[in-house]
Amino acid sequence: MTQYTIETPPVTALPVAGQDAVFPVRRIYCIGRNYAAHAIEMGHDPDREDPFFFQKNPNNLDTSGSFPYPPHTSDVHHEAEMLVALKTGGTNIPVEKALDHVFGYGLALDMTRRDLQGIAKKAGRPWEIGKAFERSAPCGPIHPVSEVGHPSEGHLEFKVNGEVRQEGDLNQMIWKVPEMISYLSEYFELAPGDVILSGTPSGVGPVSKGDTMELSIDGLGTLTVTVT
């Protein structure tokens, strides 16, 4: 039996809708600028180009329904996304086989310290300080493929205090879910427990303490999170 020198870190796991078993998370890959309108609002060309990804940490995921406003920032933005959870992995996965690796789908927010991300961008530094802070990925339960299929279209709506901030459709993604999985597998060995956040529509913006955020995607329910 392996003896560890310190207490073993807990395994991050997400609830699964309709099941007692939970989904253990290994890695989180986030695609950037995957909706044309969002690329434009961030000052970039919306034409299809090679995708790029950054990572959050597994323990950034949080299902508590509460988002603590993080330190050292005055400009925290919401980014509403669909979460993709993988049951199997591999390398060089063909696009036509990619969906065979998906366990299910859910709702997630890619909360961003936009001011710190902007500083990092200008300095040519990594984005982790703006993206991978504690509880920066509020999310809901995973809905198994056996229950919801593979959503390739569906209305996405995000509200702050009842006001619509972001709106779009999954069919507007520049890189679709099978393409994301296939592309990632060329550069990383994907594995069970990997999670992909599939990008956000336009309308990203700041939140304040006391705000109530609400994300819904057709077929995947609603996620409500309070900024504390």
Image: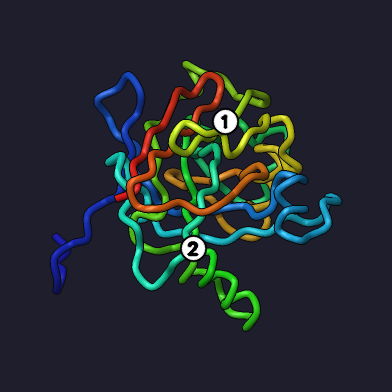
For label 1, the SS is: strand
Which residue corresponds to the image point at 39% horizontal and 64% vertical from the top-left?
133
Percent x, y of residue 71: 34, 68
Q: Is residue 134 left or right of residue 50?
A: left
Query: Which quarter of the figure has residue 118?
Result: bottom right
Find disc 1 in the rendering and name its residue: 157
Residue situated furthest right in the rendering: 47
Quarter the N terminus occupies: bottom left
Which residue corresponds to the image point at 70% horizontal and 47% vertical from the top-left?
34
Q: Is residue 58 left or right of residue 4?
A: right
Q: Earlier in the sequence, mark 1 or mark 2?
A: 2
Percent x, y of residue 51: 72, 55
Tell me how far mark 1 sits from mark 2, CA to CA: 22 Å
Considering depth in this image, is 189 or 35 the residue closer to the camera? 35
Which residue corresponds to the image point at 55% horizontal and 35% vertical from the top-left?
101
Q: Is residue 76 left or right of residue 95?
A: left
Assess whether mark 2 and mark 1 are in contact (beta carbons under 8 angstroms): no
Q: How many marks?
A: 2
Find disc 2 in the rendering and name its residue: 75
Considering depth in this image, is 140 or 145 the residue closer to the camera? 140
Let me know if residue 73 appears in the view.
yes
Q: Residues within 10 Å of mark 2 (few under 14, many from 20)?
A: some
Q: Is residue 70 left or right of residue 53?
A: left
Q: Amino acid at mark 2?
A: Asp
Disc ID at residue 81: none
For label 2, the SS is: loop
Which residue corresponds to the image point at 54% horizontal and 47% vertical from the top-left?
79
Percent x, y of residue 140: 38, 34
Q: Amino acid at mark 1?
A: Glu
